[in-house]
Amino acid sequence: MARPSNEFLMAWSSLAGTDTEPGWQAISLPSSGPLQLRAGRRSPDNAEAVLVGFPTKKLTAGDKLPEGQGFSVERADPDGSGKLWLALTRKSAGSSELFASMACDVIGALDDAVKTSSDESKLLRVFLGRVGAWQEFMRKGSQALSPEAEIGLIGELILLQAIIAAGASPAFAVESWVGPLDGIQDFELGTGALEVKTTLSTTGFPAKIGSLEQLDDSTRQPLFVAGLRLRQTESGQNLPEIVETIRLMIKGDSEAERLLAERLLAARYVEFHSDLYPRKFESANMSIVEVMENFPRMTSGTVPLGVMKAMYEIDLDKAPGGNTDVKSALRKLGAI
């Protein structure tokens, strides 16, 4: 759970100044297990920061730290003790509101992690992993999802629910969701993959295929395509409610909870945009078809020589092959 923002906002406000000497001003915050926490500002640019102290952990000179469009992570030594401190610092062009949300989320992830482990190596991975998810969020743009992207994310989340309900362990199911990480298919499960397409269309099932690789089963087999048809209704769920449903499904599995938070960020879903997704949907039907030789597709092995990239659209309603259910697909994939 995210830390309250006033912990950071009050500290940053009290430290605002015009120091010209390079260095750090910082106020201690409640610790996160063995880690020391401070809210601070770096001089002379007066940049807001959250400093995390790892009492026994070390980084090598070659270790690469995350850096996003609105923030950076840098080594700091506010006490001159030589111990490892990492400072999550806002860049001058970065949004103050967005950085505060990020700080609350990252430190909240550490708070959740220490409930199950006080190992500094694990906590460092949690810190860098959550900051890395924010890095991906910033890279893709911090604006709210477009209506089309909102529909696509809802489809992926409904299928994630179905995968967990069919018997896959929560952590395994969430980790297999690689669409937000720019995976070729949305889910990599067992030896194969599962791609999700979602539509509101009531006639036909138009599905955009983003590359020659997306429906190519030469690397991962078997490959399934799930077609999810939604309808907009007042009695359905909106995107934030669907997210909350999954959170309740995996509640108590700390690894699944951590992975879900990181995947949602990478998918550009953040809580402070939740009011922008009021539309409610329910699933009209879902069909899952295995990609076989006669499936309508273009791959690098079937297009004319010289064609390097392609985006195209197919009608999933016209794809041959028998419909299967989630559990049967997962069994064939070796995922359950």
Image: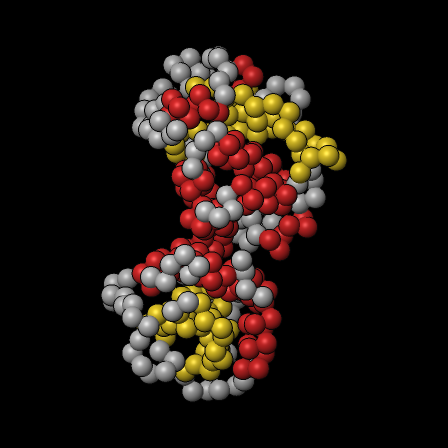
Q: Residue at x 51, y 46 (%)?
A: 251
Left/right placement of residue 276 relative to residue 1 reads right
Give residue 123's position: percent from left, percent from top.
Answer: 37, 61
Q: Position of residue 170 (x, y in %)?
A: 45, 40
**Based on the displayed image, in which of its 4 quarters is residue 67 positioned?**
bottom left
Front residue of 161 and 285: 161
Is 27 placed above or below 134 here?
below
- Residue at image position (60%, 49%) is 144
Residue placed at 62% from the left, 55% from the top? 272
Q: Is residue 302 left or right of residue 14?
A: left
Above or below residue 120? Residue 270 is above
Q: Quick check: can you spot residue 196?
A: yes
Q: According to the image, what is the colour scheme of the structure?
A: secondary structure
Residue 59 location in percent, x, y? 27, 66
Which residue occupies 42% across, 87% down?
21
Q: How many marks?
A: 0
Task: Identify which residue, 193 or 250, lies in the foreground.
Answer: 250
Tell me, yes or no, if residue 297 can be seen here: no
Query: Against 309, is 319 above or below?
Result: above
Q: Residue furthest right?
A: 234
Q: Residue 15 location in percent, x, y?
A: 54, 82
